[in-house]
Amino acid sequence: MSKYSRRRWIGAAAGASGLAGAAALAARYGLLPPDHGGLYGAGESLTYAAQRVLTRHSLAREFAPSQISTPPFANSSSPRDEEYKRLQAEGFAGWRLAIDGMIARPTSFSVADIQRYPSRSQITHLACEEGWSMIAQWTGAPLSIVLDAVGVLPQARYVVYFSQEKGWWDSIDMADALHPQTLVAYGMNGGELPAAHGGPLRMRVPRQLGYKSVKFINRLTVTDTLKSFGKGLGSAAPEDGYAWYAGI
Ligand SMILES: Nc1nc2c(c(=O)[nH]1)N[C@H]1C(S)=C(S)[C@@H](COP(=O)(O)O)O[C@H]1N2
Ligand SMILES: [Mo]
């Protein structure tokens, strides 16, 4: 074995044990993502733990109005089902966002209820895992304000959110749930949130990839464990091979 290849081999071994060590540390400090058990588990733990330690309070970049993307946007919203069309025909007056789990006051909000909370507008980048992206202005109620209103219990660790569209759900940890840029969004580029972009309500998580910004949300659950949701990996994404934590 040449010196060079031997060094490479030692480097690779050190890298692998470093990953395992990082995963052990992450577990000790409660920084294991819910999909840490799979093939890329150690890497996922390292990414999540490092981001949480280094960038917990950092803001996603915000852009100038002149940088907003112009249509058409490359999104893939399939035609909506009958239930959605019925609600849409009534101007979404009957749309409800239920909230339950580890909160003091389980309730459900109409779109108008959400719009009565203080709003935030921000021009951020939505990056799809498939390679395209767009910049838009998003308006909504910070999720932190909605959570404040229902009294999150101290044991809470995650917020799980569900779409009216079957099969779409995801979750974020409390650091992202309470982050000032995480919105329950109802507006885009100064108008209503179009159906193609998840109207009447979508989650907007600008510090993570586009798939975390679930459209057509109708239920939030606050929880201390993700084990009881789906296959226990934290969202539908890891069931298809994508990371639960998709920080950018
Ligand atoms: N309900 C629902 N939410 C969804 C999706 C979807 O197909 N259905 N696509 C996700 C993906 S992969 C991305 S990149 C963004 C796209 O957002 P846009 O349609 O506003 O461009 O929405 C996310 N939220
Ligand atoms: Mo995407």
Image: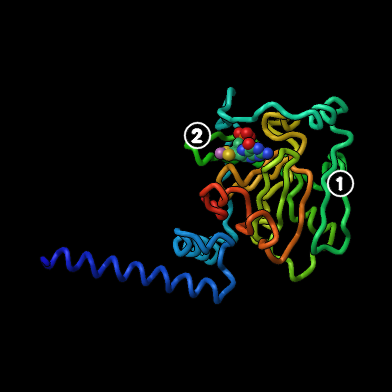
- Of the numbered discs 1 and 2, the one sitting upstream in the chain is 1
Residue 134's spot in the image, x, y percent?
55, 34
Q: Is residue 193 left or right of residue 99?
A: left
Residue 228 against residue 188 in the figure, above or below = below
Residue 172's spot in the image, x, y percent?
65, 56
Residue 197 against residue 202 in the figure, above or below = above
Within the image, what quadrant is residue 203 found in? top right
Q: Is residue 24 left or right of residue 236?
A: left
- Crowd class of label 1 (few under 14; some 14 to 19; many from 20; radius 10 Å): some
Q: Could you tell me which residue is drawn at 59 percent across and 62 percent down?
A: 34
- Secondary structure of the residue carrying tag 2 is loop
Residue 1's spot in the image, x, y percent?
12, 67
Assess mark 1: CB under 8 A from ligand 1?
no
Assess mark 2: CB under 8 A from ligand 1?
yes
Discs 1, 2 touching: Cβ within 8 Å: no
Q: Which mark identifies residue 132?
A: 2
Residue 239 against residue 175 in the figure, above or below = above
- The front one of 47 and 66 is 47
Ligand 1 position by quadrant: top right
Residue 144 appearing in the image: yes
Residue 123 appearing in the image: no
Within the image, what quadrant is residue 14 found in? bottom left
Q: Is residue 133 left or right of residue 223?
A: left
Q: Which residue is mark 1?
A: 109
Q: Is residue 192 left or right of residue 111?
A: left
Q: Could you tell me which residue is drawn at 67 percent across and 32 percent down?
A: 197
Name, please, the residue furthest toward the bottom.
28
* Three-letter code for the amino acid on which mark 2 is drawn: Trp
Residue 88's spot in the image, x, y percent?
82, 28
